[in-house]
Image (cartoon, rainbow, N blue to C red):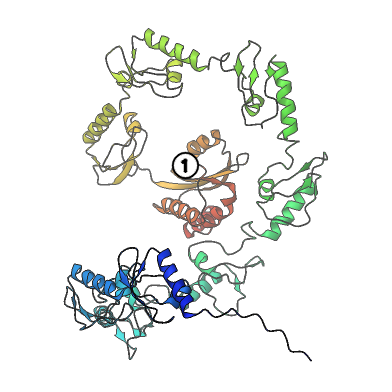
Amino acid sequence: MSSPTAAPTRPKMTSAQVWDSFQARVEELGGVVLEPAYLGNGKAHRVRCGAGHDCAPRPAGLQQGQGLCITCAGKDPHAAEAAFRARLAELGATLLEPEWRGVNKAHRVRCAAGHECGPFPGGVRKGGGICRTCARNDPRVAEAAFRARLDELGAALLEPIYLGANKAHRIRCAAGHESAPRPASLTKGQGICITCAGTDPRVAEAAFRARLAELGATLLEPEWRGVNRAHRVRCAAGHDCTPRPNGVGRGQGICRTCARNDTKAAEAAFRTRLAELGATLLEPLYLGANESHRARCAAGHDCTPRPAHVRQGGGICRTCARNDTKAAEAAFRTRLAELGATLLEPEWLGNAAPHRVRCIAGHDCNPRPASVQQGQGICRTCAGQDPRVAEAAFRARLAELGATLLEPEWLGSSRPHQARCAAGHACAPIPTAAQRNHGICRTCAGNDPRVAEAEFRARLAELGATLLEPVYRGVNRAHRVRCAAGHDCTTRPYGLREGVGVCLTCGGHTWDVLYVVADEVGDVVKFGITAGNARRRLGVHARDGLEEVVRLVTGLPDGVAVEIERNLIGAMRDAREAPVRGREYFAARVLPLVLDLIDNHPAVRAATAGAEVG
């Protein structure tokens, strides 16, 4: 049997060839060989690099791609030692080591504060400090500080030896509880005992079990899983649910089905609603309450409703609701034809996008199909909203009032323009307001902020009240005030000017009403508080579209309504729900959470129970 063919071997270079190759490589790198003769492939040869440094590379190392000069590469021991000594001098430290030990070896040093330490030159070169004691990383200092802190808190250390700043140490607190704090946490101001701090798992478990018992629920979990972990529970209505002890401790409910947030219940309700509307669900799987599902409505249109929207009373079909793209385009073209206008846009851009049009009077304009569908006009010039026409009208109005326009250029119909009224006051009227016959000068009309502030302060002084607000916030903004009787309250300058009192408490009013209203069309809910009869406040919201009164709790004790309102705002923040406007207007999806927090508040339950008995 023939032996396998050996791979061809590279012919070995002679000493002369190695020497020639070495000299050529040094010359290529800009260096000069100082060695008069070849000393061997593994021997250092004296060379001067392109930067003028004397160095001693080995031909074998140069052949393998290594650099020529250790000084240029930042690896020269002499340069490293010099840099280390220079850095110590900058820091006011003294080197105690008799000789250089290398860049990665610890060197004995005395820092400027007199502490003996052992920094590594490599670490110091990278910006590291030199003294662990000054940096508060010294184990002995940390241990002494830990023991001193325990003594301050009246605690006893049970650990026989110090385990390190980030290790738990067994201790007994002043109240006799055994716990295991970490020294590093203690230096940051944290406590030593989770039982005293109310974060003990056993205490949390007991509180969770007690709350479940109050709500008539049964804990199905065989063991405690932690305050932030879901636990299997059966609520009083028999639904299996998985509340978190932490959420329950903050007043949240335990059962998503009772709160109308259960996935299976939501799917069943969605299917039922589609059946009621004569629609067919085309989606093979339930995708979630806020996801679009393919369906076919009773009229045969393919549509994609969201279960959450349908549950809140929304329709299922955009075509039937006149939101279909093709239907919208056809309606837009029809309306333009009715108005004698010509569409100049070559293609449909969308219901909310401007389209180039020439109106019957020949003006080029850019109406939006959605606006036209809502009954708005198509031409700004014909409607008197053309910028050039508006500017001319504004200038004419100022001339009528004897005012002078100071603004060098037109800023737009809704922007303030600098002017000087006939009385010589500097003012900034808005063209649209001037066009509606509003005044142009706030000083002449008594609406100047400085005048209003002076009047507000004078009125407070008359009533013996003290303004607590550091700056004036405006005529319609609430200002913190302390009334003559010493009550802290909030009042608006406008209300005070209209004869409203400063202090609700002195006027016999307290925030004792809590309400929740909803706008089914806009998918918005709002919660709020008021005093006494809520009819006026609810009427204001009804005119804003929030017609459905979901909750109205009256007769709450002093301070409870304010507390619940703050809890609701905090719960929305924790749930990462941002207001759709203001502070208390939210998307309708938060309604179950809002009602759960309200209905489970002890004061609300007491007020509701009292109303039922009465």
Q: Would you identify the image quadrant in which residue 393 lies?
A: top left
Residue shown at 67% from the left, 26% from the top: 373
User: Residue at 32% of width from left, 89% of height from top?
Assistant: 161
Crowding at mark 1 (Cα within 10 Å: few <14, some 14-19, many 20+) = few
Q: Is residue 396 above or below residue 127?
A: above
Q: Nearer the viewer, residue 499 or 473?
A: 473
Q: Nearer the viewer, residue 91 or 174?
A: 91
Q: Position of residue 367 (x, y in %)?
A: 62, 23
Residue at 48%, 41% in the rendered image: 534
Q: Is residue 276 left or right of residue 402?
A: right
What is the quadrant of residue 560 in the picture?
Answer: bottom left
Three-letter residue code for mark 1: Gly
Q: Is residue 73 above or below residue 532?
A: below
What x and y, as percent, mark residue 327? 75, 31
**Which picture quadrant has residue 169?**
bottom left
- Quadrant showing the N terminus: bottom right
Residue at 75% x, 27% y is: 330
Residue 188 visible somewhere in the drawing: no
Label 1, secondary structure: give it: loop
Q: At which x and y percent is residue 95?
A: 19, 78
Residue with the mark numbered 1: 582
Numbered-mark total: 1
In the image, residue 257 above or below residue 419: below
Q: Is residue 86 left or right of residue 162?
A: left
